[in-house]
C-alpha cells in the first residue's frame, strides 16, 4: 500500500483558471460567497457553495443545494471549463502570501493509509460536518477540497519540485488577500514513480487542515466502490506556516480586572505593556483587559513530564488560567470563549474587548510544527482552534474524480 498515487486530475482549462479558482468552502459564509462570485459564471463557488445560486437564506445542506452543486459541475464539464487529464499525474502546487512561499505535491491520498494512521490526524471531527462533506463529494462525484498535509523534508521530492517549478506553470491565479496560487503537472511516468517511492520512504504524512474532508473520504470509500483515495496536497514541513490562534473570554467569572491580575500573579510574572503584547516565544501569553495589555511569563518552568498535548501553549493556558481562574469548561461547547485567528492581528482582540461583549483577550505564540507532529505521533488530539494555517489552499485548482 502506497501512501499516495498519481491521478488524472479534473482541472480548469488554462484560460478559465483565474475565474474558476476560489477560496475554500469553509472560510466564507453564504453571503460572502455570493458577493465574491457575482459576475463570475465559472467560479468554483457555484460548486462548493451552491446555495449562492438559490434564494437568499436557502439551506446550504438541503437536498436542493447538493443537486445544484451537481448540476453546476456537469455544466462546467460540458462547457469545457473543467476537463479531466488523459493520464495520471502528480501536480506541484505553490502558494504565496506576504512573501511566504510553500510548494507541495497534490496527490491521491490512500484512504487505507488514512485508516491505518499513516496519513496521520490530530483533531476530532463533528458528524454533521462529515455528513455535509460526504453528500457534497457524492453529489459532484469528486473530491474538490484538498486536504492540507505536510511531510518531513525529503531530497527526491525537493529535487523534483525544484526541477518542475523551473518550467512555466500550467496556470497561476490571484487569490484572496494578495495570495497567488500556481500549478504544474508531473505527467512523466518515471517521475511519478519516484514521487510515489519517496513518500513511501517517508512512511507517514500529517494532516494539517482538512480533518472533516479526510474523515468524509473514508466514509465515501465504504459507500462507493473504487473511491479509495482523496485529494491531498502535502508540503515540506519547513515551508508550512502556522499562525497564532487567540482567545477572547466573555466575562471574568465574577472577578474585577485587579482581582484577575492578582490571581494571575501567583503563577506568572506580569509586565504591563505600552503596545499590544504579542508573544515572541513559547510559554508566554499576552493579556488585554480593562484597556491595558500585559505580558504573562511563567515564574517557574512547567513540568517536563507532560504529554505532547499537555505541553502545548493552548493547553497550558487552559490548565493554569482558563479553567481554574475563569471557569471555562469544554472549549468546544462553552459559550463564554471564542477564538480569533492570528491572520486578523492583535487589533481584532482589542476590538472584541472594546465592543463590550467580551471581557478580556489572550494572545498566544503559534503552535510549532514539531508540536503538531508530536501530538499526531502520540495518537493524541489537539485542543480546538490550536493552529491557523496560511495561506489557505484554493478550491478548483485541481480536483480528484471518484
Image (cartoon, rainbow, N blue to C red):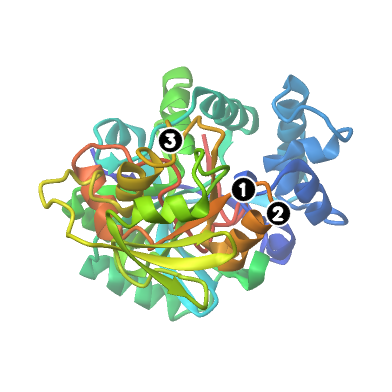
Q: CA distance from mark 3 to mark 1?
A: 15 Å
In primary-sequence order, the first of circles 3 and 1 is: 3
Relative vertical location of residue 126 with respect to residue 25 in this rendering, above or below = above
Q: CA distance from mark 2 to mark 1?
A: 7 Å
Give the residue pinned by disc 1: 358
Q: Pointers 2 and 1 in contact (CB under 8 A)?
A: yes
Q: Position of residue 99 (x, y in %)?
A: 51, 80
Give the residue pinned by disc 2: 355
User: Does residue 175 appear in the picture of this structure?
Assistant: no
Q: Position of residue 124 (x, y in %)?
A: 39, 32
Q: Residue at x 74, y 60 (%)?
A: 19
SS under mark 3: loop
Q: Position of residue 156 (x, y in %)?
A: 24, 68
Relative vertical location of residue 57 with respect to residue 83 in this rendering, above or below = above
Give the residue pinned by disc 3: 327
Q: Badge 1 local density, few (<14 within 10 Å), some, or many (20+)?
A: many
Q: Residue at x 44, y 22 (%)?
A: 225
Q: Residue at x 44, y 67 (%)?
A: 294
Amino acid at each position: 500500500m502506497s501512501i499516495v498515487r498519481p491521478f488524472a486530475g479534473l482541472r480548469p482549462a488554462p484560460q478559465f483558471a483565474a475565474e474558476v479558482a476560489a477560496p475554500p468552502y469553509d472560510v466564507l459564509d453564504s453571503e460572502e460567497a455570493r458577493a465574491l462570485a457575482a459576475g463570475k459564471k465559472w467560479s468554483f463557488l457555484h460548486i462548493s457553495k451552491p446555495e449562492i445560486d438559490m434564494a437568499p437564506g436557502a439551506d446550504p445542506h438541503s437536498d436542493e443545494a447538493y443537486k445544484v452543486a451537481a448540476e453546476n459541475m456537469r455544466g462546467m464539464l460540458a462547457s469545457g471549463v473543467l476537463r479531466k487529464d488523459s493520464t495520471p499525474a502528480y501536480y506541484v502546487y505553490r502558494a504565496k502570501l506576504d512573501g511566504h512561499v510553500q510548494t507541495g505535491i497534490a496527490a491521491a491520498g490512500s484512504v487505507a493509509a488514512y485508516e491505518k494512521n499513516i496519513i496521520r490526524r490530530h483533531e476530532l471531527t463533528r458528524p454533521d460536518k462529515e455528513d455535509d462533506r460526504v453528500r457534497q463529494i457524492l453529489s459532484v462525484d469528486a473530491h474538490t477540497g484538498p486536504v492540507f498535509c505536510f511531510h518531513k523534508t525529503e531530497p527526491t521530492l525537493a529535487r523534483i519540485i525544484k526541477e518542475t517549478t523551473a518550467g512555466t506553470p500550467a496556470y497561476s491565479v490571484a487569490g484572496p488577500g494578495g495570495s497567488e496560487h500556481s500549478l504544474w503537472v508531473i505527467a512523466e511516468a518515471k517521475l511519478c514513480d519516484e514521487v510515489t517511492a519517496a513518500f513511501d520512504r517517508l512512511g507517514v504524512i500529517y494532516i494539517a487542515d482538512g480533518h472533516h474532508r479526510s474523515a468524509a473520504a473514508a466514509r465515501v470509500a465504504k459507500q462507493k466502490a473504487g473511491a479509495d483515495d482523496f485529494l491531498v496536497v502535502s508540503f515540506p514541513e519547513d515551508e508550512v506556516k502556522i499562525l497564532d490562534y487567540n482567545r477572547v473570554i466573555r466575562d471574568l467569572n465574577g472577578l474585577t480586572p485587579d482581582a484577575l491580575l492578582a490571581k494571575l500573579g501567583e503563577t506568572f510574572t506580569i509586565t504591563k505593556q505600552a503596545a499590544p503584547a504579542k508573544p515572541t516565544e513559547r510559554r508566554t501569553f499576552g493579556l488585554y483587559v480593562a484597556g491595558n495589555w500585559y505580558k504573562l511569563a511563567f515564574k517557574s518552568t512547567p513540568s517536563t513530564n507532560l504529554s505532547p498535548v499537555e505541553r502545548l501553549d493552548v493547553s497550558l493556558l487552559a490548565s493554569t488560567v482558563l479553567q481554574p481562574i475563569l471557569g471555562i469548561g469544554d472549549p468546544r461547547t462553552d459559550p463564554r470563549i471564542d477564538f480569533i485567528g492570528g491572520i486578523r492581528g492583535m487589533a481584532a482582540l482589542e476590538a472584541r474587548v472594546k465592543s463590550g461583549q467580551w471581557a478580556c483577550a489572550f494572545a498566544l505564540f503559534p503552535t510549532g510544527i514539531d508540536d503538531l507532529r508530536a501530538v499526531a505521533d502520540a495518537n493524541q488530539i489537539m485542543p480546538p482552534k490550536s493552529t491557523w494555517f496560511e495561506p489557505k489552499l484554493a478550491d478548483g485548482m485541481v480536483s480528484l474524480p471518484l
